[in-house]
Amino acid sequence: MSDFPWFKFYEEKLPRTLKPYPEITLLDVVSETVRQRPNHTALIFKGARMSYAELDRLSDQLAAALVELGVQKGERVAFLLPNSPQLAIAQLGAWKAGAIVAPMNSLYTEHELTHALNEIEAETVIVLTPFYAKLKAVQPKTAVKRVIATNIKEYLSPVLRLLFTLAKEKKEGHRITIQAGDHWWGDLMRRHAQSPRPNVEVKHTDPAILLFSGGTTGSPKAVLGSHHAIYMSARQLHAYASTILADWDDTLTWVMPAFHVYGNMGFNTSLVARWPIAVVPNPRDLDDLIDTIEKTRPAVLHGVPTLFNALINHPKVKAGKANFKSLKICYSAAAPLLLETKKRFEALTGGWLL
């Protein structure tokens, strides 16, 4: 291999190439993980843990439900979901149904949402309950004909689910009545509790995901990625992270939203590395993020400069009452990181902020 000049900046353990890449998909990676360690933790959500075997089974159920509803191979399935167990299940499940997934920003205005849904010609949307009314308001202006609504409490522990139902569900807009013809996630999953993965061939060359550009040069545009492209990118990120992090054992904090490449590839790379994923639905909820870090003891945190700056200036952190010492490495992107922020955060963690 040629000795390219950038190799001199590589970490000692970082390979110069990963070629040849196996002609597989992330679905194959998940299947292999289930074969090796079915009880290994895939997701951690508010104290509840989901194993790889359970994630695989639930995504089979959703895939069967989508096929039953009429989703064909190559159709676009849009998500109006925050980081959540449902999002992980939906991404894998829609892939198993042969669909192209399209995570979207739940905070889009009605105009922005209409544009995005029409841009990709989505016919199916999986939506968290607080965003259901907005979706229904724009649906007549789009090609959407299937709507699946889900409540964030679906995968909470029984105690937290009860507390959420009593204290927050109605107050925070999660309690809704769906319209005729729409579907509840829970009903579909129960109906297909015994359903196997649909017999849909998913090739590594098939299109897999549509993610929207930031729109800095006009309206946001949907950018298409194949299954193999996602797998190769995840392998590359995994190789870089492996110079510091341990496969299977280290935990990733899933903070950045999956409608960004940044957040989606954090999830995908975790599947390759077999890192348990600590799920954080709202990156702006610093109390929840700090609580998640302290309880799950993650080794890696992805964020943006404003997030790291907000963390070091949080009252609990400034009072010395937050423990971030589990963090080995943190990644900052999307904007310049101030040297002062970097130094202060590294002092808190004992790790690196890059």
Image (cartoon, grey):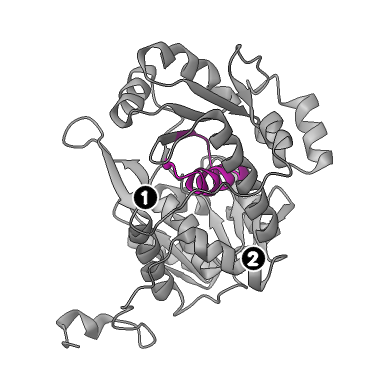
**Residue 186 visible in the shown view:** yes
Lateral position of residue 28 relative to residue 60, left or right = left
Q: Where does the image place residue 270, in percent across and percent down from the top left? A: 52, 63
Q: Which x, y percent locates residue 64?
A: 60, 40
Q: Position of residue 98 (x, y in %)?
A: 45, 45
Q: Is residue 59 above or below residue 16?
A: above
**Residue stretch in magenta:** 78-100
Residue 334 visible in this rendered orientation of the protein: no
Measure the alpha-carbon separation of dots 1 and 2: 26 Å
In the rendered image, which quarter is residue 241 located in? Answer: bottom left
Vertical order, 230 against 176 (above or below): below
Q: Left or right? Give the position of 5 relative to 253.
A: left
| Residue that mark 1 sits on | 261
The residue carrying mark 2 is 34
Q: Are marks 1 and 2 in contact (CB under 8 Å)?
A: no
Does 281 lie within the magenta span? Answer: no
Q: Residue at x 65, y 73 (%)?
A: 36
Relative to residue 265, is residue 117 depicted above or below? above
